Amino acid sequence: MSRRAVFMAGWVGLSLANGPALTAGVPLEPPVWDTQGSVVWEQSADELRASGSAPEPGYLVSQSSYGPLRLRLEVRIEPETNSGVFVGCTPGEAITPTACYEINLWDRHPKQEWRTGALVGIRPPLNQVDTLRRWNRLEILVEEKRLRVWINDALTADRMTEAPRTGRLALQFGGAGAVHFRHLNLEQP
């Protein structure tokens, strides 16, 4: 794992690069990510991937906490895959939509109000975006008291918050099939 600083309009960025395969409880080197659950995460030259069957979701979780941030990445999911990106996760607590903000990546969610682009448990997506079996661009902007999400340039969430939520990031895989993440770029003010 290497870090690459990117300077853009006052933001400093971190990007994912090559690294070893991930198994439950084994972080990338140097330790930046941890895993939670039994899902096996693999990292190749150009993507992070989790696949198979996971009745209980598993997570790749940052060891560091972040406040305001801009997270950009590309994601590809299969029809039966339950995935998501979590921000503001409370350290020491389980990764859940109540301990974090969950941006859902699950077109076929049984409750369509929580489908891809929704802030799970808070608000359905502002726009419906279909994401199956192709690469999709996801951008998450967390500001002092506002959270916005775009998928393929369509605004899916715009939430004013009472107070900033500082916490860890997490990538999720559950269900069946596979989720692929690539071109992950994190910028901070």
Image (cartoon, rainbow, N blue to C red):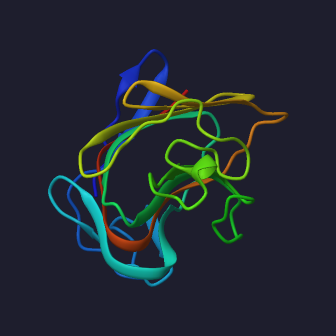
The foreground one among 47 and 91 is: 47
Q: Residue at x 48, y 69 (%)?
A: 59
135 in relation to 63, above or below: above
Q: Residue furthest top?
A: 9
Q: Residue at x 69, y 46 (%)?
A: 166
Which image quadrant for residue 42?
bottom left
Is any atom of residue 150 visible in this view?
yes
Q: In this view, does 12 lie to the left or right of 148?
A: left
Taking the spot 63% from the left edge, 47% from the top edge, the residue there is 113
For this orientation, the residue located farthest to the left is 45
**Horizontal arrangement in the rendering, residue 17 relative to residue 28 (left or right):** left
Q: In which quarter of the image is residue 159?
A: top right
- Residue 85 on image: x %, y %: 50, 52
Position of the C terminus by quadrant? top right
Q: How many labels does the image show?
A: 0
Query: For this view, does 166 lie left or right of residue 73?
Result: right
The quarter of the image holding the N terminus is bottom left
Residue 145 to residue 15: above or below: above
Which residue ends up furthest to the right in the rendered image?
Answer: 162
Q: Position of residue 151 (x, y in %)?
A: 43, 34
Q: Position of residue 39 (x, y in %)?
A: 40, 79
Q: Please tell me whether residue 164 is drawn above or below residue 177 in the rendered image.
A: above
Q: Which residue is drawn at 52% across and 58% down?
A: 109
Position in image of residue 185 (x %, y %): 37, 39
